[in-house]
Amino acid sequence: MAAVQLQKPTGRGNTFKGTEGIYLLPHHPNELERVKLCHGLMMSDTGNVLIKSPLPAAGSTIRVLDSGCADGMRTWLHDLSKLLPAYNWNLHGVDIHEDIFPSPERAFVPLDLRKHDINTEFPATWNWQNSFDIVHQRLLIWGIKTENWPAAIQRLLRLVKPGGWIELVEVVWVDNNIPIDANAQPELAKQRVLECWTCDYHGFDIQVATKLEGLLKNAGCANVTKYEYDLGIGAKANQEEWKAPSAEMWDEIFRSFEHKMPLEGIPGVAKTPEQLHVFLDKLNVEIKEHGYMPKVNFVIGQKPA
């Protein structure tokens, strides 16, 4: 997309730093709290489901890559060794911003974290091809453009050992089969418009979670399987302790879009950053009252031996 003129933000939304044009949300140390909250919510709502790929016998060494790993602490990589201690985990991760990586002495477990943009080829000097038992990627709907998903999956699949597994996890943020009563829940109805705009305007696919099975099959994977869970936010969070924090986290995600608001605004949502924040304040109240429950899809595929 050609550069567009943007409106001046209010400063209420979290700023970007070094990941503009790569990832649609801010991605720097100040954003890690949101990432960790999102991970904790997913663990709570799914009953601590970390991984659906088949695992070998207890005591086995499992070499894993997490694509889009954040800092690897108190998130998916760390919890593998914490919640599945019967295995010897060889943990690797890539992310687009190395400033968020912990120093070796701060890491809770041994981690090999490297800066890399999944939209580009992995360096041949890393010697990673055909080396991982499991390659995992989660919540990159705003990190991979619609037309780039097939190539991104092929890049990941080349890293998987023959017979190993690739696992993709995305949320069905907009389910057109579930209607919203705009009279009873006007802000949730407007949220759907905002969610679609964030993807449509910037070249991402709001429905990619529903397409993961087809993408893995087209990439040549066998034994492709989807597992579906509810992701409760606000009043629909699985545990009481998550109801308020999940609503606040969800609200803050969209405040960052004040930094990406074009001169014409967001059609059907807000004409200015100030109006965006007024809407999000109302949405926060409605989610705390009614809740929001999209589906999260875990989709696995096996690389042919």
Image (cartoon, rainbow, N blue to C red):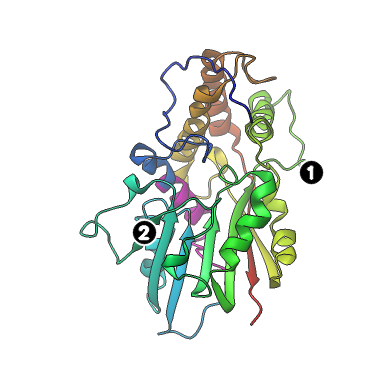
Where 300 falls versus 195 (above or below)?
below
* Residue situated in front as seen by the camera: 189 or 51: 51
* Residue situated in front as seen by the camera: 164 or 109: 164
Label ID, residue 34: none
Instruction: Indicate the position of residue 7 as horizontal and vertical percent values.
Output: 53, 15
Look at the image and give the residue range highlighted in magenta: 36-53
The residue under label 1 is which amino acid type? Asn
Is residue 297 visible in the rendered structure shown here?
A: no
Where 37 falls versus 80 (above or below)?
above
Q: Determine which residue is flagged by label 1.
A: 177
Q: Residues within 10 Å of mark 1 (few under 14, many from 20)?
A: few
Q: Determine which residue is flagged by label 2.
A: 113
Q: Is residue 10 magenta?
A: no
Instruction: Indicate the position of residue 139 as horizontal and vertical percent values.
Output: 55, 50
Q: Is residue 47 magenta?
A: yes
In 3D space, how far apart are the residues under numbered discs 2 and 1 (Cα atoms)? 40 Å
The residue under label 2 is which amino acid type? Leu
Instruction: Indicate the position of residue 192 as horizontal and vertical percent values.
Output: 68, 32
Instruction: Give the quarter of the figure containing the C terminus.
Output: bottom right
Given the current orientation, which residue lies at the most extreme front position?
Answer: 125
What secondary structure is found at the residue carrying circle 1?
Answer: loop
Given the current orientation, which residue lies at the most extreme left position?
Answer: 105
Q: Residues within 10 Å of mark 2 (few under 14, many from 20)?
A: many
* Residue situated in front as seen by the camera: 200 or 33: 200
Going from N to C along the chain, the mark reached first, 2 or 1, is 2
Where 289 falls versus 211 (above or below)?
above
Q: Are marks 2 and 1 in contact (CB under 8 Å)?
A: no
* Picture quadrant of residue 85: bottom left
**Residue at 48% across, 34% down:** 20
Q: Main secondary structure of the magenta part?
A: helix
